[in-house]
Amino acid sequence: MPIKSRIRTIPHYPKQGIMFRDITTLLKDPVGLRLTIDEIVKRYKRHKVSKVAGIESRGFIIGAPVAYLLGVGFIPIRKKGKLPGETIGHDYELEYGADRIEIHTDAIAKGERILLVDDLIATGGTAEAAATLIRKMGGEIIECCFVVDLPDIGGRERLEKLGLKVFTLCGFEGE
């Protein structure tokens, strides 16, 4: 069974008209979880990755085992105020307001090759903010990797216009 078939769709969540793609069904499935991590590791094992950066919170679930299997470090990119050390942050717009993500100032050395990971790409706003932080610190983003793409929302194109490469394991047409 492919990865896409292990992802549950919840209609009208969090609001009417939205088709929410829920990866918790993929994560609880031991075969599905293994397939997901193995596919990502297979893609990047020859890319000379320095570190994997995961976006809070589901990017941690995917990114940490990928980093482990690649034999590299893991960098958490978190919401404002969640990291204990000195941080830099980036504010970005959401559909209904604004948010901020942060990274430790010592997380990335200039020239390190970073794989950016999250569970899903929709508008691309959070991934763009994370990429901005990585680049600000001197990191080179190898690629932005997501389990799910919602192509109709345009996040992939948004990142590609910034010169970022995007890889996804599966896509769902429509919102």
Image (tube, grey):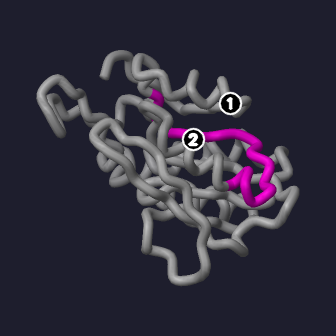
Quadrant the N terminus occupies: top left
Amino acid residing under circle 1: Leu
Residue 43 x %, y %:
71, 39
What residue is drawn where x is 56% and y is 32%? 168
The residue located at (55%, 55%) in the rendering is 90
Up-down relation of residue 173 to residue 95 (above or below):
above
Q: How many marks?
A: 2
Left or right: residue 105 versus residue 36 is right
Q: Which mark is residue 24?
A: none
Q: Earlier in the sequence, mark 1 or mark 2?
A: 2
Find the distance from the CA under tag 1 to the CA under tag 2. 8 Å
Q: Residues within 10 Å of mark 1 (few under 14, many from 20)?
A: few
Magenta run includes residue 58: no
Q: Residue 171: where, in percent of width, then height? A: 45, 24
The residue identified by callout 2 is: 128
* Disc 1: which residue: 162
Where does the image place residue 163, in percent across and percent down from the top left? 73, 29
User: Could you tell me which residue is drawn at 51 percent across and 50 percent down?
Assistant: 34
Q: Which residues are magenta?
A: 134-149
